[in-house]
Image (cartoon, helix red, strand yellow):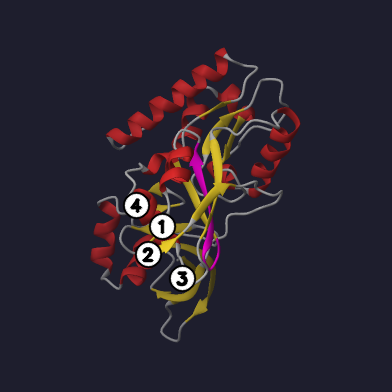
């Protein structure tokens, strides 16, 4: 892998260590800490480049379907599964459901280091993802031991935490903002998906090029948008891009640091002036 920074090098090295352990302990389930989507791609890259024989044993799971932050799990060698064929496949619901079937059949009592916690408030205050995250981090907890926070209601959520920190959260998390909360272990029902909230938007850009779309997202000039790309502030499908002329397609996810993350749904025609009209969803 052509590592771009020290963090990427460290993540790649940890991925290699996980692969080494999977080769040595071929009859065990081996798993990592929680990984960001970008780190998951680095893990996949390490497997593909150094241990391609493990591609059929490689899965990513965050405690529920469609989580963003997930652990990398290496299944035992006796598990018969198709190999991962692309970075996009590691984020597919089909692959996650396959892993759930494998885990149910061969490791029903294994948590893979993930403990789901139910958090319930008084019901009088409306609590958002930001409220939960801020209160948890204020306890001195590092982000890497936390998976997703699934907001399930006006004053309820499910927190996916590392088994090393879950007891501390249960003991110490008594308030979210000013609202008192109760925290307890949670059983994730079959088919439970981490909910994501979006705001539907229409962008107008000169073309389907990255710099054009970044210009529309940020309301900055094409020259400034190009500079954002060149300085590593833009990700496409969780991979940093520096090519301002890269073209995007429906289904692509684009993130601009400081401006949020978007899913491109469709290029829905042109304006009278010939500019592209783009339907997107912004994560909120």
Please state the horizontal and vertical placement of residue 282, each as a whole percent of the image.
46, 67
Q: CA distance from mark 3 to mark 4?
A: 45 Å
Q: Residues within 10 Å of mark 2 (few under 14, many from 20)?
A: few
Q: Residues within 10 Å of mark 1 (few under 14, many from 20)?
A: some
Where residue 243 is drawn, which disc sits there?
4
Q: Write down the region rendered in magenta.
A: 152-162
Q: CA distance from mark 4 to mark 2?
A: 46 Å
Above or below, 277 against 72 in this view is below
Q: CA distance from mark 1 to mark 3?
A: 11 Å
Residue 199 part of the magenta-drawn span = no
Is the residue under label 4 in contact with that under label 3 (CB below 8 Å)? Answer: no
Which label's residue is closer to the chain start, 1 or 3?
A: 3
Q: CA distance from mark 4 to mark 1?
A: 45 Å
Q: CA distance from mark 3 to mark 2?
A: 9 Å
Mark 4 secondary-structure assignment: loop
Residue at screen point 33% across, 57% down: 244
Which residue is the site of mark 2?
Answer: 178
Q: Nearer the viewer, residue 230 or 245?
A: 230
Residue at screen point 65% across, 42% down: 95
Residue at screen point 31% across, 69% down: 218
**Is residue 247 shown left or right of residue 7?**
right
Residue 160 part of the magenta-drawn span = yes
Which label's residue is closer to the chain start, 3 or 2?
A: 3
Which residue is the site of mark 1?
Answer: 175
Which residue is the site of mark 3?
Answer: 125
Q: CA distance from mark 2 to mark 1?
A: 6 Å
Single out the mark in the foreground, 3 or 4.
3
Q: Residue lying furthest right in this view? A: 105
Is the residue under label 1 in contact with that under label 2 (CB below 8 Å)? Answer: yes
Is the residue under label 2 in contact with that under label 3 (CB below 8 Å)? Answer: yes
Mark 1 secondary-structure assignment: strand
């Amino acid at each position: 892998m052509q590592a771009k920074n020290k963090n990427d090098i460290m993540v790649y090295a940890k991925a290699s260590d996980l692969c080494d352990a999977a080769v040595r302990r071929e009859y065990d389930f081996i798993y990592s800490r929680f990984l960001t989507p970008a780190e998951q791609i680095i893990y996949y890259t390490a497997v593909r480049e150094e241990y391609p024989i493990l591609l059929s044993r490689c899965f990513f799971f965050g405690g529920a379907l469609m989580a963003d932050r997930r652990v990398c799990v290496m299944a035992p060698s006796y598990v018969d599964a198709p190999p991962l064929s692309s970075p996009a496949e590691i984020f597919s619901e089909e692959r996650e459901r396959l892993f759930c079937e494998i885990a149910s059949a061969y490791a029903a009592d294994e948590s893979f280091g993930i403990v789901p916690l139910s958090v319930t408030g008084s019901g009088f205050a409306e609590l958002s993802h930001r409220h939960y995250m801020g209160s948890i981090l204020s306890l001195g907890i590092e982000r890497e031991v936390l998976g997703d926070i699934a907001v399930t209601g006006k004053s309820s959520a499910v927190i996916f935490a590392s088994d090393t920190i879950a007891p501390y959260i249960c003991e110490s998390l008594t308030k979210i903002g000013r609202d008192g909360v109760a925290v307890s272990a949670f059983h994730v029902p079959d088919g439970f998906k981490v909910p994501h909230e979006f705001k539907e938007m229409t962008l107008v850009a000169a073309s389907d090029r990255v710099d054009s779309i970044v210009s529309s997202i940020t309301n900055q000039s094409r020259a400034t948008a190009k500079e954002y790309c060149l300085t590593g502030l833009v990700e496409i499908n969780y991979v940093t891009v520096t090519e301002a002329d890269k073209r995007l397609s429906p289904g692509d996810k684009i993130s601009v640091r400081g401006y949020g993350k978007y899913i491109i749904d469709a290029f829905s025609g042109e304006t009278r002036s010939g500019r592209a009209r783009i339907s997107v969803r912004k994560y909120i």
